[in-house]
Amino acid sequence: MPENSNQRKPYAGKGRRLVVAIDVGTTFTAASFCILQEGRIPKFEEATADAKVPSVLYYDKEGRAQAFAAETDDEDVIMEAESNEWYKTAWWKLHLRPGHLPIIKDLALPALPVRKSVEDVFADYLGYIQTQVKEYITTTYGEGGNIWNALKPTMYVILTTPNGWEGAQQNKMRSAAIKAGLVDADGARRIKFVTEAEAAVLYAVDSGCVSDWLVHDGHLILCDCGGGTVDITGYRIKELEPLKLEESSASRCKLMIQGYLAGAVFITQAAKVYLKTRLSGTEWDNEEAIQRATDDFEKNAKRKFDSHNGTYWINLNGFKSIADLGIVRGRLKVSGMDMAAFFEPSLKSIKEGLDIAFENGGRLADKIILVGGLASSPYVYAQLVKWGEENSIPVSRPDGPTTKAVANGALAWHVDDSVAARVSKYHYGIEVHIAYDRTCKESQGRSTFRCRAGDERVHGAWSCILPKNASVQSSTQFTKPFTVELDDVPGRNFDHSVNIFVYRRAKPPKFITFPGKATLQPGYEKLCSVEGDLQRCFEGSPVRTEALTDIRYRRVEFDICLTLGETELTAQMRWKEDGEWVYGDASVAYE
């Protein structure tokens, strides 16, 4: 069954809508689009000439982008870049990674262009992808120019993220999309986010290659082996008609596990270190020659490698032979064992991640779906199939190398709404003050204060809104009551902010901070703040008077509401008026 599944129903919405899905990967990018039209079955189309294009740009000395994607491989562009000293930027997506997903210090992550943030590079690259989508539609469709002009102002854009990316990263990506002109500021909510793993599993289902695995209450593990990250997620098949999936274990994004790096770029990095050692003291012992050799490894030997027993060659340029170094007519001989050593850390990390996923899911899942660029490697695929056979776990790679899996899966996510529930990765909550308990060991050593009602209380306590590993339905709100006492004075500002914290370890301590300090305890991290206008809530609260000072104040009581059912956190503030819930405007702000 192709990606345009014949089981997909005609679009039930009104009119026409353009949806563009863009999967910006560490090494490659794919883009697909769909024109939803009332009464017609959605058709997914690729927006670039190739299924995927390099996530690479050239910048000139003034910081202007001069070449993008496949253009950067053109010999004329390379010559111009060298002549004008343009800067080539690759792997820039990894500069956006969250702080809790560190990259090992020995990884030589290329620097960003001078005076350019990762958000700037994202914007430049997304702007280029938009030109490709526009060119395809305007040149392929009859009246394509009119179609683009009519649908672009209301276009939806689906951007993919690794599992470990959170609101701060999504916020920067949304800003980049606005800066690139995909949507205007008023259309910010038309930028949607889906995890790469979720999109990939929907593509795998859509492709028909795992149809035999689609049984009610069945469990799957999706392993997305990408350029920079390996995303592993478990899914339970809740319903078949229409298809509904729910996460069965907390999704994991592996940049590093116990010192082992995971994504495909780290294999290339290991090869580069190897080349520097092998070629030390030779005419190729310089950064330019090493990089050319590394690029040749990336394009040829890395893709062909399939066995420990083979021999592989890396082109160094020229015709010189040095028998002692294994260089024959400008080509470096590399053994299959050395090639396998480049791949071993990534393979070990993938296998560890799969073990963890099965343990989190109670070892219910017994099928693995592989997608992503690294899964296209004959060696990686063969080794994981072998591992699956040793553990009696079938492994499938839908439709061979899945170069367009995530982009098309992102469209399916938007069109079909197939994922009914997700699993919360961490504990989410707020900081509150609680009654001081002299018998509580954790409360001792903390400063106390008297609230306006006269009770002795202590700051810095943890109040959980959503616990880790909870099943989160797409429409479920998680709420926590919150109280703030505000002086009843004229002309006051009613804007109020509440910090949302995340705890990334197993069991949260009772207090967020250390005694007598503002320092967060290990595992706690400020995720964002929810900001809203409390004027209506304030005005509906009764006036109170402090007993000792006669100061008038109001105790404003409201709920913090979080929705995590989609891959993006949303928040609101609510309170009751005449027995009915009233929702105030609120926004989520990230540092």
Image (cartoon, rainbow, N blue to C red):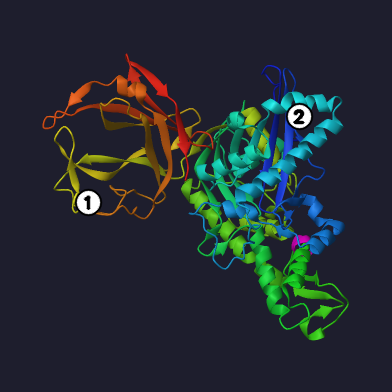
Helix, strand or loop status at disc 2: loop
In terms of image quadrants, where is residue 88? bottom right
Q: CA distance from mark 2 to mark 1?
A: 59 Å
Whichever of labels 2 and 1 marks the residue nearer the N terminus, that label is 2
Q: Nearer the viewer, residue 413 or 233?
A: 413
Residue type for callout 1: Glu
Which one is closest to the eye, mark 2 or mark 1?
1
- Magenta stretch: residue 300 in it? yes
The residue furthest bottom is 324
Q: Which quadrant of the figure contains the N terminus?
A: top right
* Image x and y of residue 369, in percent: 64, 46
Callout 2: 10 Å neighbours few (<14), some, many (20+)? Answer: some
Residue type for callout 2: Lys
Q: Which mark is residue 442?
A: 1
Q: Does residue 211 appear anywhere in the picture?
A: no
Q: Horizontally, is 263 left or right of 568 in the view?
A: right
